[in-house]
Amino acid sequence: MSEPTATTSEIKTTGSKTAAELEKQLMRAKQLIVVLCMVIALLLGALVTLWAVGGDKEATTGQAQATAASTQVGAAKSDVGTNQTPQALSEPTQEAAKQVIANAARRQSDDPRALGRPDAKVTMVLFSDFACPYCTQFAKQVQPQLQDLIDNGTLRIEWHDLAQISPTSPLAAQAGLAAAAQGKFWEFERAAYASAKDGDHPTYTEESLVALAKQAGVPDLAKFKTDMNSQANVDAVKKSRQDAYNVGITGTPFAFIGDAVMPGYVDAATVRATVLAQAAKSGK
């Protein structure tokens, strides 16, 4: 007995169902691809965020390639966790990174952008930006808690400009140099950061910077404004930024604390523990 055969109408119906199923499968495959792309994008975004946590990475121009030295320089991290005793920041191990640190401090007795004695046991070489919210946080929350170490000769802080985050960051850095020329850099630094809202990227104008200089007690405001716009200070700020990039420093705040590295914002307890550890190591 022969098997029953499908009629022409039955074949057409079966074919249309097959086509519909294929179309649904293709649609599901497309949807799956879209979802996978979104997941990959989210993972990449998370990786970028983790990379940027060490400092404010919002500069839009001129980022330098990290050198072998900077790989070690930027790799040091704090071991501090919640409710743990503060641990000192670590030191890089590569000789190239050690040489970068050794050459960073100025140690000039007449340096208007330095706090503390030139022969202090530990020098903190601090790279900062007046428009950096983490730098604002560091200036407000960390630096004041280090004053006793500055006063007793343990710590010296030397400022370096890394003006990159906002279009007016360089102008603010130039203003800092103009204030320094009249012996009022740190007063200007405190006034600038005090005026910045937490988490904000301040926008500066010549008028707002002159107002900050007045608040800081800069005596000759006309000279301040002239110096702020001088080509010498424009060039100095550019050179300072490029010098930082040349050794792979691209984010702020960033500091060498003795031979240790602070690759981004850390709390006062960690910085203090690092200073004391470096002071003990120095043997001074």
Image (cartoon, grey):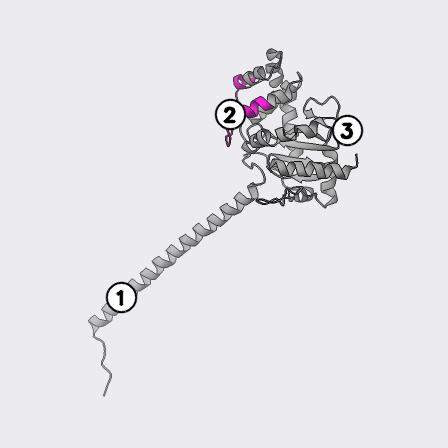
Image coords of residue 227 (percent x, y): 63, 16
**Residue at image point 63% right, 30% down:** 145
In the displayed orientation, state which residue is furthest to the right.
Answer: 283
234 sits to left or right of 195: right
Q: Does the rendering let one see residue 246?
A: no
Circle 3: element type: loop
Magenta segment: 190-209
Label 3 sits on residue: 119
Number of numbered tags placed on the structure image: 3
In the rendered structure, find residue 17 and report the number of the disc placed on it: 1
The mark lying in front, picked from 3 and 2, is: 3
Which image quadrant is residue 78 in?
Answer: top right
Q: Residue at x 58, y 44 (%)?
A: 83
CB under 8 Å between callouts 1 and 3?
no
Where's residue 75, x and y in %?
Answer: 64, 44
CA separation in Å, label 3 and label 2? 37 Å
User: Is residue 110 inside the magenta stretch?
Assistant: no
How far from the left and from the top, in percent, is residue 245? 64, 36
Quadrant where the C terminus is found in the figure: top right
> In this figure, which residue is indicated by the disc labeled 2?
203
> Which residue type does callout 2 highlight?
Thr
Q: Considering only vertical position in the picture, is 67 above or below 221?
A: below
Identify the mark nearer the N-term, 3 or 2: 3
Residue 203, magenta (yes or no)? yes
